[in-house]
Image (spheres, rainbow, N blue to C red):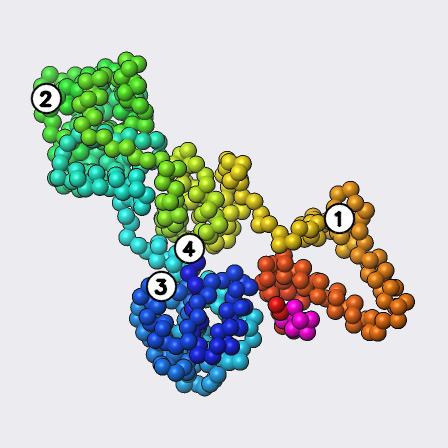
Amino acid sequence: MKPIWIVDDDQSIRFVLEKALAREDLPVRSFGNPRDVLAALDDDVPQVMVSDIRMPGGSGIDLLAKVKQRLPGLPVIVMTAYSDLDSAVSAFQGGAFEYLPKPFDVPKAVELIRRAVDESLREDVREERDKPVPEMLGQAPAMQDVFRAIGRLSQSVVTVLITGESGTGKELVAHALHKHSPRANGPFVAINTAAIPKDLLESELFGHERGAFTGAQTMRRGRFEQAEGGTLFLDEIGDMPFDLQTRLLRVLSDGQFYRVGGHQPLRSSVRVIAATHQNLEERVRQGSFREDLFHRLNVIRLRLPALRERREDIPMLARYFLAKSARELGVEPKRITDAALAVLARFDFPGNVRQLENLCHWLTVMAPAQAIEPKDLPPELHAALPADAAVAPAAPLVAAAPSASEVPASAGTTPTEIYAAAAPAGGEAASWPADLGREARALLEAGAPAVWDTLTRRFEAQLIRTALDITRGRRIDAAQKLGIGRNTITRKIQELDLDD
């Protein structure tokens, strides 16, 4: 995620917000004047901007206008110690996300910034959804080689053989070769030779005359005639029956063919692009594929990389497919977190890009929230990860016995029972009331002053430290877990001197 920019000439305000946002694991970048902000925009972009109104060297309202001109979708929170109507009106007229009067409650400010971040992330997803649909995506070197090859072939109608595993996008490449060729105005006709029964494939390719066989009620044009003046894409050419390979070779050699049952030769002006996931050289050695046809098809060969060979493209492809699925289903596009993308990048995707697209469609329908986390990915994906790449929970800050929140508690379970269940295996079931009693007895018998206040402070401090440890320093979440208010936990942290 991009950083939150804090713009204020008051260093104490910047310090307080920096520290509060750091506890929320939000990246921050601070500025003391509008001039530095405008200069930084040349090299960086914020996720959210929080800006004071009155600063030396420029007005926050003027800064808001200039930033909005360059980044119209950026949420900007305007803050000021001068809470007057004119400032509020000017801020909202300038497109501010929200107006924050000083002095402000820090947890409330953080909550407001969180809302602005969520809005910004939704805006990022909308922009991704509304981008023009590209022909193909890929920044990996192997895909850039493919794009360069398509460019070099753009003025040619030479026969091309596309190889690669199933799901790598061979038909997309064939489409691109056709679109960027001199035959772009002609038809693009595709046929999967492995999906059509052998008895029907000849008629599909070359057509048939009326009465050529039982059921041939009328004359039918085949794919070669349909593709006249354009491109014929023969997918899974390695599965073509051997006798049909001879007929295909004849068309490629002299440009003539006969319909099934026909006696009049037909001329063909068609560019052929073939594709296969099989090793054609091996099939030639096995005698199941004609060597002369292989050489006729293998004029230019393009190999498409498997997705596991271009893992750096997975985040871009995942976001694109999520936006595409949202468009198709007419729903709000979902956002995938960096943690979930890291899991996807470790998966081998045996079904390649097609499998990733199907996964994103599944997530669009099945993921419970708008932000997709690792836990939202299907179980079979986690199960298929290598053992050393399995997604493990974050390591605790301090090695300890399981916390009560990690121990399943049935209805009616008492805190003492939960505490006992969390004790290390093999040890005695700990009882925190008994420990407290022993500590109180020792202090009381020793005549220590203010035992009540001493133990209460230690008890409250330990509760808050533990909750903050579990929530990784997020005070709002810690307060919710403890069942107290946000203002209460902030006050207690100050009273107990826990704000380190």
Residue range of the region highlighted in magenta in the rendering? 488-498
The reply to whether dot 2 and dot 3 touch (C-beta < 8 Å) is no
Amino acid type shown at disc 4: Glu
Secondary structure category for the residue under label 3: loop
User: Which comes before the other along the chain, label 1 or label 3?
Assistant: 3
User: Which comes before the other along the chain, label 2 or label 4?
Assistant: 2
Task: State the separation of the CA atoms marked 1 and 2.
Answer: 83 Å
| Residue on which the image places disc 3 | 44
Residue 173 is situated, as x and y percent measured from the top left of the image, at 25, 37
Give the number of the disc on residue 254: 2
Secondary structure category for the residue under label 4: loop
Q: Comparing marks 4 and 1, which lies closer to the viewer?
A: 1
| Residue on which the image places disc 1 | 423
Q: Comparing marks 2 and 4, which lies closer to the viewer?
A: 2
Task: State the separation of the CA atoms marked 2 and 4.
Answer: 54 Å
Amino acid type shown at disc 1: Ala
* Mark 4 Cα-neighbour bin, 10 Å: few <14, some 14–19, many ≥20: some
* Residue at point 26%, 40% (across, down): 145
| Residue on which the image places disc 4 | 332
Residue 193 is situated, as x and y percent measured from the top left of the image, at 28, 25
Q: Main secondary structure of the magenta part?
A: helix
Amino acid type shown at disc 3: Asp
